[in-house]
Image: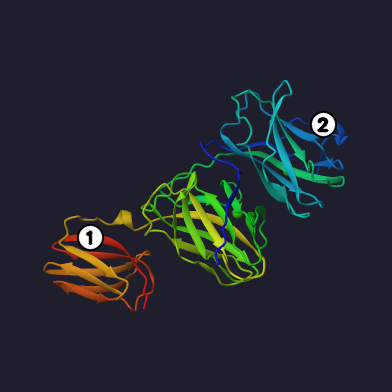
Amino acid sequence: MKKTITLLFITLCSFSVYSADLVLNNFNDITCYTGVSGSFGSTMTTVNGTGVITVPANNTGEYIYFSLPAGFDVNPYQFLKISVKSTETNYRFVPGLITPAWTSSEDWTGTYKYTGANAWQDIYIPLSAMTAGSAGTYDKIALKVAVYDYKPSFDMYIDNVTFVAKYVPDYSKDVIVCNFDNVIATMGGFSSNTISTTINPNGTGNVGVVSVPANNAGGIAVNTIDKINTATHNKISFKVYASQAFTINFEKLEDKTNNAINTALGLYPAYTTPNQWQTLTMDISAVTTNTYSNIVLFAEAWQSKPAFTFYIDDITLVKNGIVSAVDIASDAKTSVYYSSLQNTLNIKCEGDGLLELITLTGVVTKSVNMHGDTTLELSDIKNGVYLVRLKNSGRQDIQKIIVSNKL
Ligand SMILES: [Ca+2]
Ligand SMILES: [Ca+2]
């Protein structure tokens, strides 16, 4: 029985131009003036090359701040990155840009939290929800630590306070959609599950964590920066990790501003080896490019299963290595028709020709010399997307087919 699942989005950030990172304070050779407000009660101190503050109990708005260079412009930057360590865990940071007149623009919408439990964790705090202003508008950046999290007083270590430059994809290569570190997409969970960012349970860096409720779908929706072009990037890959096997049994590409424009992929990538990171790949080369800009992944949708959690990382649009390398002739004297019912390829061919069935990684799995019209049996071919290359009279034609043996 299908259940209705509605999108519940939280905005984490957005993207535009590029410049270099700016380290504000590493508590070693790069330092800037810092201060604290009200009941923090002490200034930030430096111990062994890291900053230390005592966060007050039940903080309702006290903050630490860092001075910005003269004429600072926040526009080229996407995140403020801080390295944090404390025994207290699961508390948040509210950033605020402060003008010389002590007015501020703050962001209370984010979900960036310290989850490290006494391990160092890099926290990437998006800057997009604050008013950017122009060069010189702001001269300080403040952080409210554990504000309204109702924590007891605790010591927090902080290091490497850095503005991280915005990410601009290079479409001649693989494009990172989200790595939960320096590239974080706008993303959301669904009505019955949550997503968040945490430290990698088996490796380095940060990863996404997706809850899957009992007897229901757990999912993640991730916006791409630009529309997905399946002619140039024909695969989506992502890493997953869990303590049990599971299947991504519903996947869609959608328009992020109008999810009525969508296509279901029906690819069912499966995570098979618990407690190891595994890269899953979805071939989207059969999908016609549209205004798709949102990748939707559901785990165990509509299954009667207990609740579990999976981790996800490195969601990537993979550059297509094949289409650009071939030359497609529209006047080739051949045509091809795939019958999924009979699982045959039926080729119309004038005179002699060569037919090749090629996987998307470029492996020729079948090669047949044709003498006129030809029927090719595909029952020994695995289901999936293939390229059919037809060479005839010095021309060649490439067509994509999906083999789905229904018998
Ligand atoms: Ca340091
Ligand atoms: Ca990562």
Classed neighbour count for the residue bearing mark 1: other residues with Cα under 10 Å, few (<14), some (14–19), many (≥20): many
In three-dimensional space, the C-alpha distance between marks 2 and 1, rounded to whole angstroms, equals: 69 Å
Q: Which residue is mark 1?
A: 397
Image quadrant where residue 101 sits = top right
Q: Are marks 2 and 1 in contact (CB under 8 Å)?
A: no
Going by the numbered disc 1, the residue's amino acid type is Asp
- Picture mark count: 2
Q: Is residue 182 left or right of residue 61?
A: left
Q: Position of residue 375 (x, y in %)?
A: 22, 75
Element marked by disc 1: strand
Residue shown at the point (28%, 69%) measured from the top left = 338
Q: Residue at x 64, y 69 (%)?
A: 275
The residue under the point 57% across, 46% down is 186
Q: Quarter of the image containing the N terminus?
A: bottom right
Q: Is mark 2 within 8 Å of ligand 1?
A: no
Task: Locate residue 346: give its quadrant.
Answer: bottom left
Q: Is residue 337 found left or right of 230 in the rendered image?
A: left
Q: Earlier in the sequence, mark 2 or mark 1?
A: 2
State the mark number for residue 37. Answer: 2
Q: Nearer the viewer, residue 75 or 21?
A: 75
Residue at screen point 52% across, 50% down = 177
Q: Amino acid at mark 2?
A: Ser
Position of the C terminus by quadrant: bottom left
Give coordinates of residue 66: x percent, y percent. 73, 32
Is the image coloured rainbow, by chain, by secondary structure, or in one colour? rainbow
User: Percent from the top left, x then y, of residue 124?
Assistant: 65, 44
Query: Disc 2 on helix, strand or loop?
Result: loop
- Which residue is situated farthest in the top direction here? 101
Quadrant of the rendered image holding ligand 1: top right
Image disc number at residue 378? none
The one of 238 and 264 positioned closer to us in this rendering = 264
